[in-house]
Image (cartoon, rainbow, N blue to C red):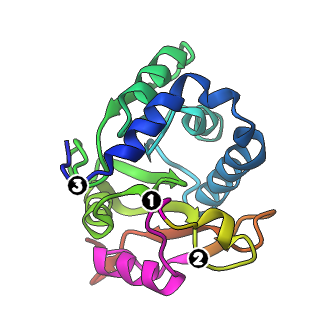
Amino acid sequence: MCSEVNERDVGRFGRWAESYDASILQRLVFAPLQDFTLREAQAAQPVATSILDIGCGTGLLLRQAAQRFPGAQLTGIDAAEEMVRVARSSAPQGLSLRFARAFGEQLPFPDAAFDLVVTTLSFHHWADQPRALREVRRVLSGGGIFALADALPVGLLRWIFTRNGHGRFNKPEVLEGMLLEAGFAMPRFARVPRFSGTVQVVLSRAAVVGGKPT
């Protein structure tokens, strides 16, 4: 377990696990964001055989991903043990789904294990964001896509989504710099409809050096 993780946040999400899928935020925020993120990810990476969702919650995004990427191996990790338990118990039969408790800073996977990594409204909770981005880059195969959806301190709704004490939010230029430093090519920012430019999906491809994937 990463000692720097904000235990308060982990505990809060753990207590929310049983009622998470029934929350009104699913309809108003999470579901539209997950759908947009997957559409953008699929446009950037039409074929993905192994997908990782960091901060997967109860696995809702991965169940949607199964429809967009038939036959893909779907993996979800979450810092909250109760979220992982609910995700495992609610996984539909017949889908190639696996879940584990883990942290972005210490991904328990070999190098180049995935060709698509996603995370939605989780990044601002990560304890060591630069370290975790390097881990994401490590587990991505050459040319793989990282789709990071989060609130940014910009736009009309920034006071709602990025209030003090709710996490660490980065201005677009800061997030872009962290991604480049971690070994990603120039990221593309896509504004999620309905959120006034505050919630965005950042799509980054594993950088290529000398004509070959790093």
Which residue is at a point 45% across and 61% down the rendered structure image? 167
- Nearest-to-viewer mark from 2 and 1: 2
* Label 1 residue SS: helix
Say which residue label 2 marks.
153
Which residue is at a point 26% across and 59% down the rendered structure image? 135
Mark 3 and mark 2 lie on one chain; the one further toward the N terminus is 3
Relative placement, left or right, of 132 versus 199 is left
In the rendered structure, which amino acid carries the disc numbered 2?
Answer: Pro
Q: Which residues are magenta?
A: 165-188
In the image, residue 175 sits, relative to residue 65, either above or below, namely below
Relative placement, left or right, of 176 versus 69 is left
Q: Position of residue 110 (x, y in %)?
A: 20, 46
Q: Position of residue 104 (x, y in %)?
A: 31, 52
Q: Residue 4 bears which disc, if any? A: 3
In the rendered structure, which amino acid carries the disc numbered 3?
Answer: Glu
In the rendered structure, which amino acid carries the disc numbered 1?
Answer: Phe
Residue 176 inside the magenta-drawn segment:
yes
Q: Position of residue 137 (x, y in %)?
A: 31, 63
Q: Is residue 10 visible?
A: yes
Query: Which quadrant of the rendered structure holds the C terminus?
Result: bottom left
Between 98 and 88, the one nearer to me in the picture: 88
Say which residue label 1 marks.
123
Mark 2 and mark 1 lie on one chain; the one further toward the N terminus is 1
